[in-house]
Image: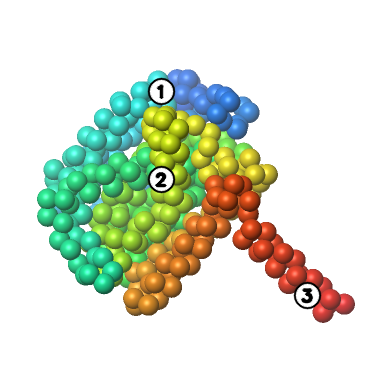
Amino acid sequence: MFNYVDLFIAFTISLVATLLVTFPVRRFAIKIGVMDAPSSRKIHKEITPRLGGLAIFIGAFIGMIYLQPYHIYMNEILIGSLIILLTGALDDKYTLKPYMKLTGQIVAAGLLIYAGLIIERVTIPFIGMIELGYLGPVLTFFWIIGITNAINLIDGLDGLATGVTTIAMTSIFAMAIVDMQVMVAYLCVTFIGANIGFLYHNFYPAKIYMGDTGSNLLGYIMAVISVLGLFKNITFFSFIIPIVILAVPIFDTVVAIIRRLYNKESIMAADRRHIHYQLIDAGYSHRKTVIIIYIFSILFGFIGILFSETSVILSLVCTVILLVLLHIFAELAGLVLGGKRPVVTALRKLKQKVLGIFRRRSR
């Protein structure tokens, strides 16, 4: 049984701690020269300190100290987080080669798998539950590495990765409460608080970036809580739920990989063709682009919750809605139909007609 007062206190502690500790972390980043300079691949115009992920970690850690959770994999999760944090911090400072960053992620993922934290089963529609056996560690490995990098890839605009992971964790937190997943709820509530505290400094125009220190950490934590909670939940569509909740970063990652393979580029190479950049190139402002992605993340999170609680028929309806939303999202970003956006245009015309009807009635 959850003590909701303790959850609220832990959330508040993490929020306030991160809000306050970000100030000295920012000064520390400036002092040691961990700065993000403008370039042709980036859209910010001023040199901005990075290393904000350190503040998020400290805030969430203080919240967890208050909760004092016990879990069989607690030590491995903490050590893995520190490995990811250190790897990200070194990358923020020295710009590590891709294989060096990947090495840190592999060590952190391998530590969890060696301890026994693996995806044990998946539920496939109309087939049922399938025990993965030896495939479990392999799937777990690619899931942790994939989600860690997916969050890293969308960290291109002020407040984007912070907000998207907050929305995703809120959806998972709601399901963790229903399913009595204590450790998942604790991790979610502390990192939600830490993210919101950091967002005060990170939303446009950002005073500090989370850097790879933060994006890799949040991606790693997202992967861990999904393996801990959602994949352990033996319900219909259990494998689909975390994918739906993380639809925006996963969609962006898949598109980036396909694009780079098609262009015969390294899949680890950075570029300026991610969804958030495409939206800005399509004419949306920095702030509006972030809000658009927030809205879609909220919709996907809500659909993820429906997947976990509904029947087969409603789950299929949710799937159709999900595909429509993904298509609209792809249209907004100019990723389909050669940049034409018929559905978006139709929705705008419908909006104008509805507003016109209301105006005529109000006269």
* Disc 2: CA contacts within 10 A as few (<14), some (14-19) or many (>=20): few
Q: Which residue is mark 2?
A: 254
Residue name at image x 70 percent, y 68 percent: 350
Residue name at image x 47 percent, y 62 percent: 323
Q: Which residue is mark 3?
A: 358
Reading the chain from its start, which is encountered first: label 1 or label 2? 1
Query: Which mark is drawn over residue 95?
Result: 1
Q: Is residue 264 left or right of residue 221?
A: right
Question: Which quadrant of the view contains residue 351?
Answer: bottom right
Residue 168 in the image: state x and y as whole percent: 42, 56
The secondary structure type at the circle numbered 1 is loop
Whole-number angstrom distance, CA of label 1 to CA of label 3: 55 Å
Residue name at image x 62 percent, y 42 percent: 280
- Asked whether disc 1 touches disc 3, contact meaning CB atoms under 8 Å apart, the reply is no
Q: How is the image coloured?
A: rainbow
* Disc 3: CA contacts within 10 A as few (<14), some (14-19) or many (>=20): few
